[in-house]
């Protein structure tokens, strides 16, 4: 049984001759890859089993403890750090969605990658845009330095394309429902039509269960899930003909994304021009698989091994072009398993959150207590940013905030409640991110205009997902290291293998890649620092 893979299209690989990475010309192509929800824990767990693309990258420079250092370990904030050199506090992307209670529109819920200037924009019907991203991304810097540089982003999720592609890429394509799409009115390059046609053909056929490799067998066991969801743990990605949702939540999505990235590279001749080009790839299936099945069953095992193979095919294809390229791979955040299985694996404290902690439920309880009506608290669940309703009289706003903070702090599942005043008063964190306190993590994803009136942080391994009936059984977004710690990998032909144990930030990626290609970044304009790796000369501080 073949997955949607690009290997079939490829000529025999011609490996670029290794050369000493020092004193080399900058690569002609930088390939920046983000794997959605790839925790450092998961990478370590599977590293001995990788034989494809991950194995190749593992022979480059491996930072096993990279950090998305901030507390709001969600997709949009995470992707906003990867190619901007900046933490969410500077990128402005503090969550996937936040509330703007002062907005004129009825829907106060703002999507991180929508263009709010488009009339009728809502968080669910919007025009994709990096409008909310307050900083330039790597492609913007490259084009400013040399307008001949080409920047192409291909991703599974639209927000990944918006955040990593920045404000002016040449091409930005993302998955939507049954194929890859772009901004309205954008003409599709041939490779987009080709990949979409191939996707259509693959989708039209049913997909039998994938074979389970020996490595995955011990993990294949059904676990019941609390909260109304179906058991997970022994799935093998069987799919009915035409089931686009199942296509998306499977290795097929990453295969299609890599096929399009390879197709656009070839069609546009990226890496063959005068300037260094940038190819951005967002691989989103890992996140969908994690949310739908957890991280320790047959499903994630199959997904990671498939992704390893697809990445291997993709790199071999790049080799065959003779283009001098460098790769960086990281993740937007980590993740954690379902509490039901997590408890079996020794995490006794793993539980699902008390639904009474949901902002709406908490607002109702406070209203009953204080004799106030209406929606008093606005929030996106049982943790994260909570906003106190603006329509209340100032004295009532204060009473509601005090009562809510007291109630949250008294709950056994809550680790901390930090007020906006407390977070604002903290200095922007410095030093290694593994040493940061909770308030430092909160400060790194705080924005005075967009953040809530207070921030609720649940205890470690308290899953914010209590209703599993709609298909998601676990999530990320916590300030804990299983969500913060991600691999950061750099590879170039001939690079000396290097294992680096120190804690670094994903904000360090941009200045490092910039130094690799000789791109100047204005001092003080970013949070990250250039990492001293083989073949990179960091600018003097
Ligand atoms: Zn994500």
Image: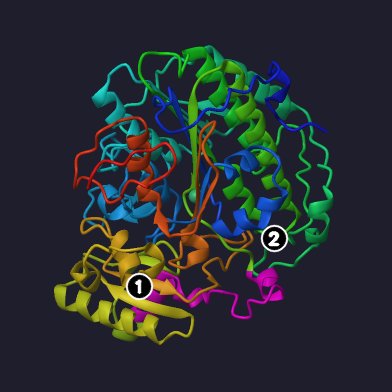
Task: Pick the residue in front: 452 or 2.
Answer: 2
Classify residue 262 by image quadrant.
Answer: top right
Image position of 168 (left or right of 535): left
Q: Closer to the observer: label 1 or label 2?
A: 1
Q: Residue at x 63, y 76 (%)?
A: 347
Task: Where is residue 91? Give x, y as percent.
Answer: 28, 48
* 344 is within the stretch colored magenta: yes
Magenta portion: prevailing SS class? helix
Task: Where is residue 155? Give x, y as percent.
Answer: 50, 34
- Looking at the image, is 369 positioned above or below residue 276? below
* 435 is within the stretch colored magenta: no
Image quadrant occupied by the N terminus: top right
Label placed on residue 197: none
Task: Pick the residue in front: 252 or 127.
Answer: 252
Does dot 2 land on a helix, a strand or a loop?
loop
- Looking at the image, is 20 positioned above or below residue 331? above
Q: CB under 8 Å between callouts 1 and 2?
A: no
Which residues are drawn in magenta?
339-367
Task: Where is residue 165? Give x, y as percent.
Answer: 38, 33
Distance CA(mark 1)–CA(mark 2): 29 Å
Classify residue 515 by image quadrant.
Answer: top left
Does dot 1 land on a helix, a strand or a loop?
loop
Label placed on residue 437: 1
Label placed on residue 296: 2
Q: Residues within 10 Å of mark 1 (few under 14, many from 20)?
A: few
Image position of 338 (left or right of 223): left
Image position of 100 (left or right of 351): left
Task: Identify the mark nearer the N-term, 1 or 2.
Answer: 2
Task: Where is residue 22? Give x, y as percent.
Answer: 43, 33
Classify residue 391 by image quadrant.
Answer: bottom left
Q: Residue at x 70, y 69 (%)?
A: 341
Disc 2 under 8 Å from ligand 1? The reply is no
């Amino acid at each position: 049984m073949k997955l949607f893979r690009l290997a079939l299209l490829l000529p025999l690989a011609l490996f670029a001759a290794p050369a000493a990475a020092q004193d080399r010309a900058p690569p002609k192509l930088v390939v920046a890859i983000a794997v959605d929800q790839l925790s450092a824990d998961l990478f370590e767990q599977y590293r001995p089993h990788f034989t494809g693309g991950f194995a190749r990258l593992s022979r480059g420079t491996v930072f096993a403890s990279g950090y998305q250092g901030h507390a709001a370990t969600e997709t949009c904030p995470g992707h906003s750090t990867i190619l901007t050199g900046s933490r969410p506090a500077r990128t402005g992307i503090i969550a996937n969605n936040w509330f703007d209670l002062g907005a004129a529109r009825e829907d106060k819920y703002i999507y991180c990658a929508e263009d709010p200037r488009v009339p009728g924009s809502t968080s669910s019907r919007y025009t994709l845009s990096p409008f909310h991203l307050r900083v330039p991304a790597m492609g913007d810097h490259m084009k400013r330095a040399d307008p001949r540089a080409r920047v192409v982003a291909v991703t599974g999720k639209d927000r990944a394309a918006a955040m990593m592609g920045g404000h002016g890429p040449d091409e930005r394509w993302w998955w939507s429902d049954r194929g890859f799409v772009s901004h309205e009115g954008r003409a599709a390059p041939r490779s987009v039509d080709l990949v979409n046609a191939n996707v259509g053909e693959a989708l039209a056929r049913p997909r039998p269960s994938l074979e389970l490799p020996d490595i995955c067998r011990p993990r294949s066991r059904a676990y019941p899930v609390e909260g109304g969801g179906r058991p997970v743990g022994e799935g093998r990605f069987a799919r009915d003909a035409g089931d686009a949702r199942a296509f998306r939540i499977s290795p097929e999505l990453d295969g299609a994304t890599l096929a399009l990235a390879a197709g656009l590279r070839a069609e546009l001749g990226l890496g063959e021009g005068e300037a260094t080009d940038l190819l951005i790839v967002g691989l989103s299936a890992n996140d969908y698989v994690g949310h739908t099945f957890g991280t320790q069953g047959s499903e994630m095992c199959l997904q990671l091994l498939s992704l390893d193979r697809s990445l291997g095919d993709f790199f071999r294809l790049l080799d065959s072009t003779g283009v001098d390229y460098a790769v960086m791979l990281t993740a937007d955040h980590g993740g954690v398993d379902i509490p039901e299985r997590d408890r079996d694996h020794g995490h006794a404290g793993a539980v699902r959150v008390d639904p009474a902690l949901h902002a709406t439920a908490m607002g109702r309880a406070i209203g009953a207590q204080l004799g106030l009506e209406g929606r008093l608290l606005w929030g996106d669940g049982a943790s994260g940013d909570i906003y106190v309703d603006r329509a209340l009289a100032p004295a009532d706003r204060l009473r509601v905030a005090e009562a809510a903070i007291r109630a949250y702090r008294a709950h056994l599942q809550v680790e901390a409640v930090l007020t906006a005043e407390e977070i604002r008063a903290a200095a922007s964190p410095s030093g290694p991110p593994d040493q940061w306190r909770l308030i430092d993590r909160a400060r790194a994803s705080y924005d005075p205009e967009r953040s809530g009136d207070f921030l609720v942080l649940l205890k470690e391994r308290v899953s914010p997902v209590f209703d599993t009936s709609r298909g998601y059984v676990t999530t990320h977004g916590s300030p804990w290291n299983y969500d913060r710690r991600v691999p950061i990998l750099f590879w170039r032909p001939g690079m000396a293998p290097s294992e680096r144990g120190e804690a670094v930030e994903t904000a360090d990626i941009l200045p490092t890649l910039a130094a690799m290609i000789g791109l100047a970044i204005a001092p003080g304009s970013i949070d990250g620092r250039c990492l001293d790796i083989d073949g990179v000369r960091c600018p003097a501080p």
